[in-house]
Amino acid sequence: MAMGFATLFAMGVALFASGSQAQGTCSSPDAQVLILGAGMSGVSAARKLYDSSVSFIILEARDKVGGRMRAVSFAGATVEVGANWIHGVDTTMNSKYKVNPVWDLRTKAGLQTVEDAELLKVYNASGNDVTSAANAALDSYDAYNTQILALSNAGGSSDISVRTALNSAGWVPQTSPETLFADYFYFDSDAATRPENVSLYGWKSESTFDDFGDSNYLVVDPRGYEYLVQFVGQSFLNTNALHLNTTVTSVTYSDGCVCADVVERGQMKTYCGRQGVVTFSIGVLQSKAVTFSPPLPPWKIDAISKFFLPLDLKVFIAFNETFWSADAGFNFIGRAVNDPDSFAYTLVVPIGQLLPNNPSILLFLVTGNAAYRVASQNVSVTRQELLNALRSVYGNFRATVVDILVPDWASNSLYYGSYSTARVGITADTFTKLASPVQSLYFSGEATSMDYQGSVHGAYLSGMETADSIVNSGYAHGLSFVPALVMLLAAIVF
């Protein structure tokens, strides 16, 4: 019975990978390309290489793929502790928009999502409903934001912070708790840091909503958002091309050779390829947890330093019963308060009502300095702070806490943060240098995407683009085992 080329190639990849024993030289490489990391960018790069018949090995420190897309079991439900939204979707078939590739994957994979209409119920520190005043403040912020996005800014020495731009336009959020809330809702909850820390040039460069549409969707699938990574790599992730529980400790590179020293399931090994794809987060690159030999050149180090990885902390709390409004029309519960430190608990998502069986779970979105404080403090302190925030809105409810989950991306040595943000002073050239290869060492990930930085679709597209560069390079088909193996298998089968 005839077998398709894709099946034959998968067999070739599996046989080649299983036959390699981390030989550690480029005279007899383990694969054409080493991919360091199995998040969305690494797996999408592998997908492109697979479709182009270029061999690869993926080295991943965790016990599964997904990177910063991670679902966990909590209080009987599946919750997303990392990426959760598909940003930039148009469902009206408007011809001015392109199709978001992650939305396309979601459709093909049948991933369950709900639309985030950004509807709010906002309360002040006394528990009074101030939704009307908060919506007016949000409209005002939006008008000022439109003004600053129209400013001419080439980056570099002419760059300013988003806060400076907003202030120059006339936005002064300190005038009321509602304006402070609007400032937080429209900026901090998106960038995971304060406007004074972020480059206006970088903020203006992000074009998700201009390119793909202005709707957002929340992933609520029991399989997790990470299932899309599995879906992208379904043809090869079950082969020996994927090495899980394999932590890269150092990378040696030259023209036509990249080797990675790893600890794989407790054993030290070395894998080599003609080329390598680095998908480490900005946080990992800045931490120097992985050493490079020779050291990365100054222009690359400088580009890496122009970004940072703030902490977008998602704190989940489960109760034995639901005491908040179960009106599915309100996606967010907001708290308009004066105390900046209370920003830790400004925004709440009644996430349970969107999940199967409607568990009594609330999700607090915590960013900036408050996120680092909450992530590092004892969970009993966090528990009390959460209850105090909720009682300021709902009074002395009788429900009891079942469980609390505080995932910490900041101290996780595989990431050191949530998603990348540009510092003041960057230029288009900064993004170019961040993504540019150093000899045979390529760089990929959401941080390298000038148009879609900090997003899942940015990670996906950067992986595809990096693999394209490799396929079109002079080394792309340096290993000729695939055609020969496919011919051999074809002869056997037919």
Image (cartoon, grey):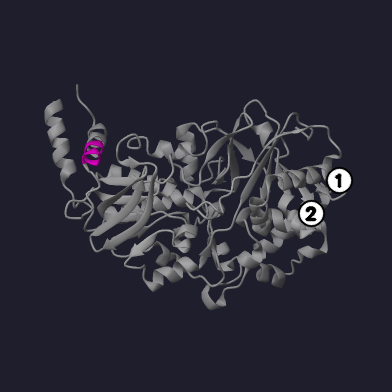
Pick the residue in front: 475 or 101. 475
Residue under label 2, please give it: 136
Q: Residue at x 70, y 53 (%)?
A: 185
* Upstream in sequence: badge 1 or badge 2: 1
Q: Circle 1 sits on which residue? A: 127
Element marked by disc 1: loop
Q: Specify the principal SS of the magenta part.
A: helix
The residue range painted magenta reads 14-19
Looking at the rendered structure, the kind of residue marked 1 is Gly
Disc 1/disc 2 C-alpha distance (Å): 19 Å
Find numbered disc 2 in the image and state the secondary structure of the residue it sits on: helix
Residue 16 lies in magenta, yes or no? yes
Q: Name the residue located 76 percent from the left edge and 66 percent from the top edge.
A: 172
Q: Is residue 130 above or below residue 329?
A: below
The quadrant the C terminus occupies is top left
Q: Position of residue 416 (x, y in %)?
A: 52, 55
Indicate the quadrant containing the N terminus: top left, top right, bottom left or bottom right.
top left
Residue 195 location (% of width, % of height) = 65, 64
* Residue depicted at 54% across the width and 78% down the height: 157
What amino acid type is highlighted by mark number 2? Ala
